[in-house]
Amino acid sequence: MAPSASGEQDRASQGVYSNMRNMPERLDWYQDMALGMYLYWTVDAVLGLVNAHSVVGASPDYLERYFRQLPAFFNPRQFDAGWYARLAKLCGFDYVTVAAKNHNGFCMWDTATTPFNVMNTAYGKDILREYVDALRANGLPVGMYFSPDDAWFQWQRGRTPARAQDYANPERNAELLEYDKAQIRELIEGYQPDILCFDGYRDATRSLVEYAWRLRRDIMITRGGIITPEQERRDELRGPFEAHYTIGTQWQYKAGNDALKTGRELIELLIDIRARGGTLLLAIGGPDADGRLPRNMDDRVREIGAWNFVNGEATRGLRPWHVSHEDRAYFTWNAEQHTVYVFDTLPPLEMGEWRSLSLKSVRATEASEIEVLGQSGEVLEYQPEVDPRATWRQDGDTLRIRYCRAQRLYNNRRWPNPVVLKIKNAADA
């Protein structure tokens, strides 16, 4: 990945480098989506290495082994694109972005531009085509990640693979620019992506962004078209933006030595990003060398999925409230239905416990109704004498809500993740 937090990247994202912008209707379409799955994968996943970056500063013998030998070991025989598409659909991901080409120049599709591609591996099949077909079959928009700086291209011309030198930048290397354009044309014409994410160093993508829009104007471009902060919270940002995060410390599969975010940390990332109108693109740490998702990553994805299954209506198709949060309560807003969603990120409640919240940025009206997403409010298991319905009153400028956790989601009745309240017919305070 590129250092997206730099001033250069932000200026590119705001359109300084481009004469074109994402179409307003495509921005609206994109901002309705809460969560993207990032399937980040290239040839060095067979060793669980950092994606592509190890070739920068590498010795000649390392490069020879990397470019000549690794493809022979790339054979993910247990890969099933349909499984990933179904997992994304089940767990509430709104789109999937697949790494088509990384900084090393390895192409995950059947390309005529270079022999350094998936067809010339032990696997020998067009993985990008498998992904696209599976995602389309499951009704999921297809995103593609593309890096314009290409270590293979440099190495073949006797140059030291690099990222910051002029010869690695298609804006300063006409031959590389035409090479990248040929690949972009193959991707757009042959695979019809809905979303493109360009990952160039500094201003390396401006011509490719405009070229992609000339080929198909309605493609949504995230990096290169909107701001895309990477592994950092940017409190000042308001949507649309695409926040790039990993579950662990690496974009693709890492063979050990990793530290993973908890499910709750990931869910709270999603909540914070949506409360500010952004979208979370989450790299899930797979596929691994065999094409499978590691068990610990699968656990995180399904924990997010369980939370989405209960609370997904509070993140999709919505916009920010006039404030993103009050203390530990975060907000999203459905303008058409005059509904505010409140995400309670205070320490979790056990089933049957009550909590009181006081809010000053939302007012109840005579027509207001308040409920906890996922539960009916009509019954607390094994306690028929308890009325678990939420209650509230408007006390001057403060809305006071009392609610109960009344749905069992784990056997031990301890659900560690945030509760969401739905306030119908809400008013701005």
Image (cartoon, rainbow, N blue to C red):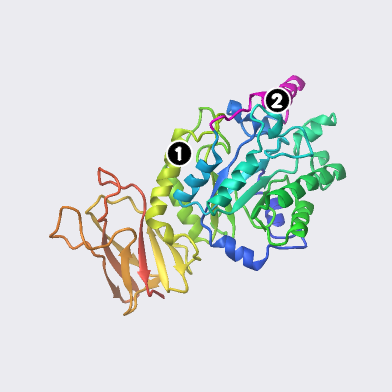
Residue at x-position 64% and y-position 43%: 129
Q: Nearer the viewer, residue 140 or 165?
A: 140
SS class of the residue under badge 2?
A: helix
Which of the 4 quarters of the picture holds residue 388?
bottom left
Question: In the image, 103: left or right of 329?
Answer: right
Pick out the residue farthest to the left.
385
User: Which quadrant is the N terminus positioned in?
Assistant: top right
Q: Amino acid at mark 1?
A: Asp
Q: Is residue 82 magenta?
A: no
Mark with earlier residue (2, 1): 2
Residue 66 is marked as 2
Q: Position of residue 277 (x, y in %)?
A: 53, 61
Residue at x-position 63% and y-position 67%: 25
Q: Is residue 300 above or below residue 196?
A: above
Q: Is residue 71 magenta?
A: yes
Pointer 1: residues within 10 angstroms few (<14), some, or many (20+)? some
User: Which quadrant is the C terminus positioned in?
Assistant: bottom left
Measure the alpha-carbon separation of dots 2 and 1.
Answer: 29 Å
Q: Amino acid at mark 2?
A: Tyr
SS class of the residue under badge 1?
A: helix
* Region in magenta: 56-78
Q: Nearer the viewer, residue 16 or 314?
A: 314
Q: Is residue 204 visible?
A: no
User: For mark 1, what is the residue?
Assistant: 298
Pick out the residue farthest to the top.
61
Q: Position of residue 411 (x, y in %)?
A: 26, 43
Pointer 2: residues within 10 angstroms few (<14), some, or many (20+)? some
